[in-house]
Image: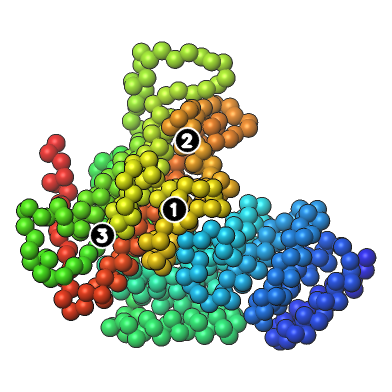
Amino acid sequence: MDEEQLDRLNQQVEQKKKVNDFRGALNIVRKMLNFGPYHRALYLVGANLIIIGDELRDKNIIKEGIEILQKNFKKIISEESYAPYVYYNLAKGYYALFKIRKDPYYVCFKQRTELNRAKDYYRKALEYNPQDNILLSQIWIELGNCFDDLGMVIDAMECYEEALKISPDDGFALGNKGMTLLNYASLISKHQGTFLIEAYSLLSQAIKCDLHNHAIDTFSKCLEDIISAFPNKKALDNPPEFLGYSIETDNNFERFLIEFCLKNGLYLNICNFCQKCNEAIGDAVTISRMVMPIEDIISINEENIKKISYFRFSAYLNQIKQDYVSSRFLLILSRYKDIDLNFVDRNVSIIDTLDYSMHNIYIELIKLSFKNFYDILDKIAYFLNEYLELGVVHDWEIDFRKIWYSNRGKKENKKVRKKIEEKKNLSLNALFNIHLDFEDGGTYENLRRTRNALTHRFVNIKLFQTMEDSENMKEETLVKKTIELAKIVRNAILYLLYFVYIEESRKKKQIGENVGVITPPKIPDDLKSSR
């Protein structure tokens, strides 16, 4: 094997790509095939074909590169350091195939699209904990792009944040975060101007970076959109200074709770990724508005008020939020060390089973928190059933895993309900994709198995646990799982609200000039409890 010759050819390929001579680069890559089944040559050929095919918008070249990497996968990763690179390039290939379609709604409510496969491969690459920061940053950015295209804007934002932690001046991370913020701003009414200013700042930084022309053109177009939509042009170039948040309380537990929520991003608001002011503290999200014909609003009275959709769905959301807040409280209470809860376990006889199992109120609080967080997903399913008028009447069918389908066949034979498919709503698709991640083989399958064990069997928490699984783990592992689940449920609630916002905006257009908007007042904090 002539390594030097292979290196020379690869350098020639890189030179051709730099001057946008992708046909010339393709011809050189073909020569690399002469090196036979050598793992490095196979990797370089597959990866380069994907990159070149993407630039030429040629799906056949992309598929050829994917096939080479998949067919020779075990041979290539015989040198384990190649594994994250192979997964990254496979993800890049499938993402390129998705972009060639030029149909943003193609992915809606499907399980095995190119975009879903790209997302899975990017996640797989991350599992190998790559030490190459350039690669790691790119994985986070491109995984964020996948989430954004799936409608999962909060997940996308978190990915761009991870990339910026690695490389704060990365133009693609800055620009993509700015674009996502721009889309984010279109889904909200409160603080929309603040988000647009932040998006403008990020995009302005991005176009000053060393990026290819297509990226600069895309980011520049977004800047133009912000400028045309923003009433105060001076504010864009001279944004207000935010002094950060301040915690104003004399209660030590309340301070701990606020700090825990901010650190882990557990508030139900749109500022978890920002935290530049006190708006980051609290669970501010609500159904901001619902529309209906003006004559229906005028006819509201005490007898028919419960039939008004805004009040009905706001009542559902109120309970979903309270379930989330109480689940979060249980988690935080289990972590707070300045309140001694050991009195709860006094005079409770526990047998020593000689396996280092732990039984105490702190662990039980975490278990309850985990179960309660998971149960919120089924209430989201109930909300969807009512809002979309799916007509599901049996409680056992109103389940976050089942509500999407009109039949109960095997995974490959399930049919998505027509009323869901017809929506073409990316925020609803975000919820659908969260559901997919809880299925067998999904990223959150382990969380589902832990929940099932907590509900139907037992989860064993041990002081010493060398081999952990979904039913046997250390206390800190269960805490990490609960925080992870809390963030997933937080996102699901926010995507539910975005879904409603989009649908109500569509209804407003359909009703036309005769439209009315209901936005009733909120209950003050001092009236929420009589204690």
Pointer 1 and pointer 2: residues touching (CB < 8 Å)? Answer: no
Q: Earlier in the sequence, mark 2 or mark 3?
A: 3
Separation of residues labelled 1 and 2 (CA atoms): 21 Å
Question: Which residue is more in the foreground, 6 or 503?
Answer: 503
In the picture of the structure, the residue carrying the numbered disc 3 is: 287
Q: Quadrant of the C terminus?
A: top left
Number of numbered callouts drawn: 3
Pointer 3 and pointer 1: residues touching (CB < 8 Å)? Answer: no
* Tag of residue 452: 2
Residue 1 rendering spot, x and y as whole percentages: 93, 65
Secondary element type, mark 3? loop
Amino acid at pointer 2: Asn
Tag 2: Cα neighbours inside 10 Å, few (<14), some, or many (≥20)?
some
Amino acid at pointer 3: Ile
Residue at position x 15%, y 41% in the image: 529
Residue 259 rendering spot, x and y as whole percentages: 36, 48
Residue at position x 53%, y 83% in the image: 216
Q: Earlier in the sequence, mark 3 or mark 1?
A: 3
Amino acid at pointer 1: Tyr
Relative to 205, residue 347 above or below: above
Relative to 423, residue 454 above or below: above
In the picture of the structure, the residue carrying the numbered disc 1 is: 405
Which residue is at the far right?
A: 1
Secondary element type, mark 1? loop
